[in-house]
Image: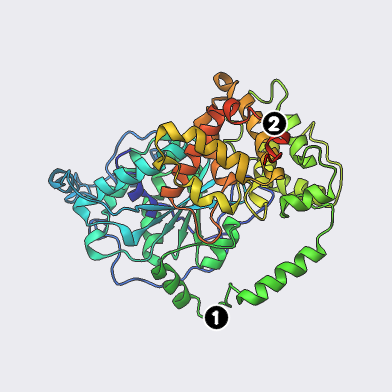
Amino acid sequence: LTRFTNALPLAPQGPAINPIVDNSDEPQPSLSDLHDFEPKLEFDDTELLAPSPLEKDVMVGDFVLADDPELEPEEDVNPLEDDFEDQLRDQSETFQTPKNKCDFLGTDKQGRHIFAIYASRFPEKSQLEAFVREIIKEIEPFVENDYILVYFHQGLKEDNKPSAQFLWNSYKELDRNFRKNLKTLYVVHPTWFIRVIWNFFSPFISDKFRKKLVYISSLDELRQALGLNKLKLPDNICDLDDKLNPSRKPSTPPPSSSINASRQQQHKMATTHQFGVPLKFIVMNSPCLNSIPPIVRKCVDSLSITGVIDTEGIFRRSGNHSEIMALKERVNRGEDVDLKSVNVHVIAGLLKSFLRDLTEPLLTFELYEDVTRFLDWPKEERSRNVTQLIREKLPEENYELFKYIVEFLVRVMDCEDLNKMTSSNLAIVFGPNFLWSRSTSTSLEEIAPINAFVDFVLQNHKDIYLIDVNQRTVSVD
């Protein structure tokens, strides 16, 4: 666990292939042309000049020992040997890392958490291990679920180049959950040297892990791969992208034109739509009992069956993306979909997708600032504050749907001995789908209180929902 992040730049493999293939659970490598833009400073490659391969070692997990005799060293010399041990020995325990080691970019098209790591934030070599420890600490609560990593290669400097030995050891010591549940590693703005590094290590890495690597040559391609229209990224990343892709058309239209386009789109929406529309629109145009959209009720009913609700990893594992998209299209056409024979993870993904596709989060933009201050509230005031927010500030349809989903998730929690989904695990999954920022990406500092808020609601739902919504809406003068 101590050297996780430094393994990230190794992810690139072979020619890039297209990451967007709807009929597969796993994103596929990319077809976008790789550029050979080479920063002046790169990874420390001095130890790669010797022709001998890695030292022989016992490999487990994603690493395999090659039987090719050509891989046996002719001399008793380790070509990756450098000052790696000295770096660790001399490292100061009091190293102060930057506040933000990595960023939370949101969830992708399948509801998986997306984390960004920037080479420009790497500290000097002697402090890399402490830096890695901090990143591990930040994202470790999330890696029990499927997740995505995006590595931005721009900004590597002479004094923070990880050695190949450091990268190799980092991957070998990576916890199983980090490797197993990582579904895709996007390497943005890859260089020629990245591919050389990857080819050097590829004989020792399993095919299964290599397939998780996808090269991305532009931010537009990254947005498409992740299914995100907006990405809040550092200026240096955007500036490099403009330099590498000068012919790219502006991806953000003028505010006035975007507003007009949004209005035109709403006029064109069929009344049967339940995905990608406001909740109020669904309540007004669909047969909603107690403001519960029909597709949400179907998903909950299907997932509540014994033998389904206790499925291990329910909501944690990703469903087949092409199946989820096909079901969404059918629902929006007004078809009556039957979920009896649909895979449990596809149904779970459909429910998460409904929440994620709402034009405004279920907990509303208005509550964003209040919820992100949850951890700052004194513990003795949290129950009163949460109850007040939910009962008094949520619109009625939002209140009803949030209550309905919370009650279902509590039933999921009751089966945690079998499905392994505690209130904390469910909060990590649903927090970013219940609430997100109107204008910017949600940072790790903000996602923590959002998840804690949802966790608190799940554990205290009886007190919060003691009063019925009909009593809540009655005003007393």
Q: Nearer the viewer, residue 470 or 365?
A: 470
Is residue 323 visible from the viewing direction of this image?
Answer: yes
Q: Nearer the viewer, residue 226 or 78?
A: 226
How far apart, in angstroms, are the residues tagged by discs 1 and 2? 57 Å
Quadrant of the snapshot with the C terminus: top right
Q: Residue at x 63, y 30 (%)?
A: 465
> Horizontal and vertical percent for residue 414?
59, 21
The residue where tag 1 is placed is: 247
Looking at the rendered structure, the kind of residue marked 1 is: Ser
> Horizontal and vertical percent for residue 383?
50, 32
> Horizontal and vertical percent for residue 18?
59, 59
**Mark 1, secondary structure of its residue:** loop
Quadrant of the snapshot with the N terminus: top left
> Horizontal and vertical percent for residue 14?
48, 58
Direction bottom: furthest residue:
247
Classify 10 Å Cα crowding around label 2: few (below 14), some (14-19), many (20 and above).
Answer: few
Q: Residue at x 66, y 72 (%)?
A: 258
Q: Considering only vertical position in the picture, is 331 above or below 346?
A: below
Classify 10 Å Cα crowding around label 1: few (below 14), some (14-19), many (20 and above).
Answer: few
Q: Nearer the viewer, residue 276 or 14?
A: 276
Looking at the rendered structure, which numbered label has been put on residue 278? none
Q: Is residue 234 left or right of residue 15?
A: left
Q: Considering only vertical position in the picture, is 41 above or below 298?
A: below
Looking at the rendered structure, the kind of residue marked 2 is: Asp
The residue where tag 2 is placed is: 468
